[in-house]
Amino acid sequence: MAPTIAPVPKDLKKRFQTPRQEMPAQDPIARGKNFQEVTLGLEAEAAKLEAYRCIYCKEPECVQGCPVGIDIPGFLHEVEKGNFAEALGILKSTNLLPAICGRVCPQEEQCESLCKTGKSKGNRPVAIGRVERFLADWERAGGIAKPVEVAPPTGKKVAVVGSGPAGLACAADLAKLGHKVIVFEAFHKPGGVLVYGIPEFRLPKAIVAKEIANLEKMGVDIVCDFAVGLTATIEDLQKAFDAIFVATGAGLPYFMDLPGENLGGIYSANEYLTRVNLMGAFDPEHNDTPVVRGKNVVVVGGGNVAMDAARTALRLGAEKVRLVYRRSHDEMPAREEEIEHAEEEGIDFTLLTTPVRYLGDDKGRVVAVECRKMELGEPGPDGRRKPVEVAGSEHQFPADVVVVSIGNGPNPLVPRTTPGLETKKGKIVARDGSGRTSMKGVFAGGDIVLGAATVILAMGAGRQAAASIHEYLQTGTW
Amino acid sequence: MELLKQSFELLEKRELAPKVNLYKVRAPQVARARKAGQFVIIRVCEGSERIPLTIADADPVAGTVTLVVQEVGSTTARMAQVKVGERFADLLGPLGAPTHVAKIGTVVCVGGGIGIAPVHPIAQALKAAGNRVIGVLAARNTGLLFFRDEMRKACDEVRVWTDDGSEGKKGLATDAIKEIQAEVGQIAEVVAIGPVPMMKFVSKLTKELGIKTQVSLNPVMVDGTGMCGGCRVSVDGKSKFVCVDGPEFDGHQVDFDELSRRQAIYKEDERRAMERLVKEVR
Ligand SMILES: Cc1cc2nc3c(=O)[nH]c(=O)nc-3n(C[C@H](O)[C@H](O)[C@H](O)COP(=O)(O)OP(=O)(O)OC[C@H]3O[C@@H](n4cnc5c(N)ncnc54)[C@H](O)[C@@H]3O)c2cc1C
Ligand SMILES: Cc1cc2nc3c(=O)[nH]c(=O)nc-3n(C[C@H](O)[C@H](O)[C@H](O)COP(=O)(O)OP(=O)(O)OC[C@H]3O[C@@H](n4cnc5c(N)ncnc54)[C@H](O)[C@@H]3O)c2cc1C
Ligand code: FES
């Protein structure tokens, strides 16, 4: 959608002087002991004030910073006037999951990084993500209840494999166009990383459940406990469906192959977070699935996943949570807000350090991590300075739980069981903009194509694929 | 293709031995797709764990899978409370790589205790491929044995061994292998499934005897599709994910001691889960 161009208002100065509205949050000490959401969301008046900080640029660059090109000025202008329903309509015409994106998108690197308000001296960008979240929460709280309009049935059937943001976004668009959509999910609950990875204190699961319930209201069927490639192959699905969208994500945990890495108490972030989030290990009163609750927890890594693991460990009662990362603070790939939250909560950042081996007791449980110091050397091909080990700098930290959060590879299940599907380094090869793979009628998108990326990119890929699936279903041309 | 929501109804339940039950569950997709050596992950109800169980048998026409389960802790105890006509919350499968089946000659399939159930479909498949299959059922005592008739059907010959001599010959699974080797001379392969110590000692013996040996490993699992790495074991010094790379491996290369230690990580939590179950039932 083309961004709204509105006449520049006269009160620019006043707009510039309005301070960025702070996000209310739970007290850091209290929140370190519970799994409730950390940030509390803006109130309506604060949201209006925040939207008022938009200065009506002629060429709103924020829109270019958004991977799905939301009409940001458009919805801000409506919020400013208090027209929340209209604002929501504008937002939702490009972003189907605003309650989720408003919480987890790296806005500071995307839309907000290009905001002109933020470029002026002493000022900070409009908190676009916070206003987005406000609108979504306002809707959920009963602001409006407009059922989504669904086109008459086309008689075409589409299988969506995987129920993360890519799969959900694709399913919603296809259902709106009148196609019959069945989503297949290997886990017993849909949502992908949104339910098993990202913790409750950052993204309440009730929000994801609500989005999924909306999808079901639109006629989408979700079949859980169904692993495509095993329960049925892509070839089997081809016989029953007119098109297939593969959105199986990046669910292959990397380990470092260090001595002692298979000791008890050493987890991949996927396992640790799945036990806690999906299987409810934080609440042993109601759930059987256990997780080792350490006193001294070491988390290896510096991305969002590592922050989530560290903050989860704290909430499970750890006395000391140490995050070990091989580069410095500036290179950490996690969102700045998450790093700040983790620091406030008392996570110890042990930077320029890497684990080299794990030590265990006679029962085979981890008791310590041996690390080595690192220095930043010359910039590598990605522009980041390469860490180099400092010889003779070995030292040990006590640890009864270690969470390895150094990244994930593409989920291998579908590539491995689908001969004829072209892949590159384990990722499914899909054409830019359409998601078409090397197999006729099979589309792919999200982390399985991009590698571990973001919710909004996965969603964008799902929507693009939906548009191109629709075209394929109508024309039959590949 | 069946595209309806699945419902995993319990159609039949039978006690085979004390604390060992057979469950026949409706799961048409799984019944159709499964091959020997594969397993399912089941979740009994809301709040219970995801546990892996081998598909002991399946009927693709009737759309059922058969599981044989030993009650060892809270989840298997919860399972035992489910009545015919009720449903399991979730059943995912078939998981794992199917057994590699080829015509190789005389194969000895050893099932130790509950391992008799998972060895059964493998014996079936190996016999169907034209091998001579000798089944060995081994248990502490006669009360713990089951599937005698099923195994006789699946194998060319079945031998029974008990630790205390209460049925068949007195001795361990390893004694059975020594005896068979002495009689038939050339054993092409041993498939051994049972408690970790049994698989460990069988593998030790067959390594000395130079007989290729497959074992089926049972680490703690979560997803069963390769996304958590919780099921990793060391095979030939390398980490493998049992749920996707296995569950069968070359017994001569498995680090059984590491597997035992990893299985025991949650001892304390398991006790707590059991207490919760006991409280609920009362
Ligand atoms: C802990 C963590 C924190 C993160 N934090 C952020 C954040 O703050 N902001 C952000 O933008 N991004 C974040 N990300 C990344 C983001 O979550 C992903 O980029 C996004 O979820 C990818 O979406 P997807 O739909 O491609 O795949 P996924 O969300 O991975 O979903 C794939 C789904 O497919 C299922 N599946 C896989 N194989 C099969 C099969 N064969 N058959 C059936 N189903 C199958 C899986 O079970 C899963 O449910 C985070 C990721 C993690 C792990
Ligand atoms: C591939 C595979 C196939 C299996 N097939 C069978 C079978 O056909 N019949 C059968 O009776 N058992 C089988 N098992 C073992 C079965 O999964 C465990 O007995 C069961 O998980 C125990 O759960 P529980 O809650 O009752 O016991 P718990 O009290 O939780 O634990 C008892 C012991 O069971 C093991 N265990 C616990 N949780 C898990 C888990 N999530 N995954 C795996 N093991 C666990 C541990 O070794 C633990 O010490 C199989 C295991 C695997 C990995
Ligand atoms: S059970 Fe998670 S990877 Fe095997």
Image (cartoon, coloured by chain):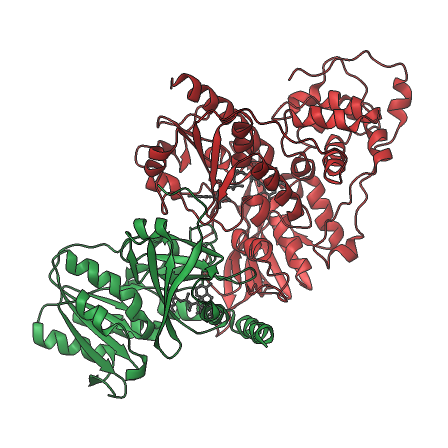
- Which of the 4 image quarters holds residue B66? bottom left
Q: Is residue A276 above or below residue A411?
A: below
Q: Position of residue B121 (x, y in %)?
A: 25, 61
**Chain A representation colour:** red
Report the number of numbered marks: 0
Write down the colour of chain B.
green
Q: Can residue A433 be seen by looking at this rendering?
A: no
Quadrant of residue A29 within the rendered picture: bottom right
Q: Position of residue A280 (x, y in %)?
A: 60, 58
Q: Nearer the viewer, residue B279 or A431?
A: B279
Residue A460 image position (x, y, % from top left)? 56, 28
Residue in the image at 52% along x and 31% along y? A170
Q: Is residue A71 left or right of residue A380?
A: right
Horizontal and vertical percent position of residue B61: 28, 51
Q: Nearer the viewer, residue B80 or B244?
A: B80
The image shows residue A147, relative to residue B145, as above or below, that is above
